[in-house]
């Protein structure tokens, strides 16, 4: 996530409040959310001096960065919680090979947690 300065957060505060208000009042669907994200990107691109590869690439990178952050901070911990609660469908495979590959490529032994 782009951990921006407190000063920049304050500058963006009104926009953030508006986002929360819209999302809370309108009960956005997946399509609504996709549309609004695209509109934000369009507004960003229209504010640029020219439409070029660099500006388009920056917009795409911002979307990918947000996706990566959502996966890392919300989806993966949620999945781990559900594995703990409901069991691991891949447990048989992991147990057979006695190792798991953690995100980031680090190898850890399953049976004792030692590297």
Image (cartoon, grey):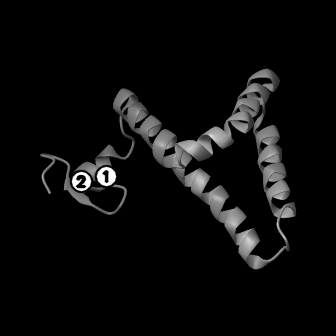
Please state which of residues 80 and 71 is positioned toward the viewer in this rendering.
71
Left or right: where 1 falls relative to 110: right
The residue where tag 1 is placed is 93
Q: Quadrant of the C terminus?
A: bottom left
Left or right: where 57 falls relative to 78: right
User: Residue at point 75% right, 78% down?
Assistant: 53
Place of residue 30 in the rendered image (x, y in percent of width and height, measured from the top left): 75, 39
Q: Would you identify the image quadrant in which residue 104 lies?
A: bottom left
Mark 1 residue element:
helix
Please state which of residues 75 and 43 is positioned toward the viewer in this rendering.
43
Place of residue 76 in the rendered image (x, y in percent of width and height, measured from the top left): 45, 43
Q: CA distance from mark 1 to mark 2?
A: 5 Å
Give residue 71's mark: none
Please state which of residues 50 and 59 is positioned toward the viewer in this rendering.
50
Q: Mark 1 touching mark 2, by CB under 8 A?
A: yes
Q: Would you identify the image quadrant in which residue 41 lies?
A: bottom right
User: Residue at point 78% right, 33% down?
Assistant: 29
The residue where tag 2 is placed is 96
| Furthest residue toward front | 7
User: Residue at point 39% right, 38% down?
Assistant: 80
Mark 2 residue element:
helix
């Amino acid at each position: 996530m782009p951990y921006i300065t407190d000063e920049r957060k304050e500058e963006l505060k009104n926009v953030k409040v508006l986002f929360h208000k819209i999302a809370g009042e309108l009960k956005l669907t997946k399509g609504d959310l996709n549309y609004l994200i695209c509109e934000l990107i369009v507004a960003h691109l229209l504010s640029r001096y020219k439409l070029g590869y660099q500006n388009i690439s920056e917009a795409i990178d911002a979307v990918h960065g947000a996706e990566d952050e959502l996966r890392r901070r919300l989806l993966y911990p949620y999945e781990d919680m559900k594995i703990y609660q409901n069991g691991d469908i891949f447990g048989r495979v992991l147990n057979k090979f006695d190792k798991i590959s953690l995100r980031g490529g680090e190898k850890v032994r399953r049976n004792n947690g030692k590297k």
